[in-house]
Image (cartoon, rainbow, N blue to C red):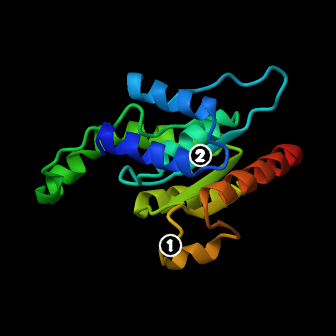
């Protein structure tokens, strides 16, 4: 996704939010000027509210959801930073080339795994692919509250969704559910 596409998605998400205000506009301007998603400081004495958002690099809602979660005070693991360099010709690789590419990808996978193990809650932000679904299943298996969010308001029909109990049909509903899931998760720890 290009920065223009990401900026458009963030603008769309923020403008559709009931909470659009000066802070949202400032976040969007910061993204426009730096190309990075901001990380606000966590309040002293507050328990960490770590969330892992499993999604697709092609999901236009991902950058905006990360901004909203961080604006709310959550620590969000941003798996897109640093980006994993993917050969644009990878669809034409041989099996040997594919297997050889595992070595540099393993470090990226280990970072995801550590972030999932450390999170207090996980979000499967749809639409998403196989990797994001596997990450959400990993979180669920680690007894992390896992919320499936139909960010575009349309279901992505996958049998694996039967394994989850928490579903949000909008980003606003997700943010509300995430707050509840994180409070419950931290109190149980």
84 vs 176, left or right, is left
Would you name the residue on which mark 1 appears? 154
Secondary-structure class at tag 1: loop
Q: Residue at x 52, y 49 (%)?
A: 13
Q: Which of the two residues, 134 or 96, is positioned nearer the viewer here?
A: 134
Would you name the residue on which mark 2 appears? 52
Q: Residue at x 49, y 76 (%)?
A: 158
Count of numbered tags: 2
13 vs 88, left or right, is right
Say whether residue 62 is visible: yes
Q: Is residue 72 above or below residue 1?
A: above
169 vs 83, left or right, is right
Residue 170 position within the rendered picture, expressed as x and y whole percent measured from the top left: 61, 62
Residue 175 position within the rendered picture, expressed as x and y whole percent measured from the top left: 69, 51
Q: Residue at x 50, y 64 (%)?
A: 152
Instruction: Decide: few, some or many residues near mark 2? Use Cα within 10 Å; few <14, some 14-19, many ≥20.
Output: many
Q: Which of the two residues, 122 or 5, is positioned nearer the viewer here?
A: 5
> In the figure, residue 146 lies in which quadrant?
bottom right
Q: Earlier in the sequence, mark 2 or mark 1?
A: 2
> In the figure, residue 41 lies in which quadrant?
top right
């Amino acid at each position: 996704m290009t920065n223009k596409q990401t900026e458009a998605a963030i603008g769309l998400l923020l403008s559709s939010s009931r909470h659009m205000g000066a802070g949202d506009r400032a976040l969007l301007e910061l993204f426009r000027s730096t190309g990075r998603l901001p990380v606000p400081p966590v309040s002293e004495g507050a328990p960490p509210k770590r969330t892992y958002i499993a999604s697709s690099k092609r999901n236009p809602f991902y950058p905006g959801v990360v901004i909203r979660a961080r604006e709310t005070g959550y620590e969000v693991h941003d798996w897109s930073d640093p980006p994993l360099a993917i050969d644009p010709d990878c669809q034409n690789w041989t099996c040997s080339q594919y297997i050889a590419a595992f070595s540099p990808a393993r470090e990226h996978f280990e970072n995801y795994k550590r972030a999932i193990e450390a999170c207090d809650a996980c979000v499967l932000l749809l639409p998403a692919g196989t990797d994001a679904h596997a990450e959400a299943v990993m979180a669920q298996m680690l007894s992390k509250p896992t919320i499936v969010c139909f960010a575009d308001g349309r279901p992505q029909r996958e049998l694996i969704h039967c394994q989850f109990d928490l579903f949000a049909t909008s980003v606003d509903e997700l943010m509300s559910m995430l707050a509840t899931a994180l409070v419950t998760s931290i109190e149980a720890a």
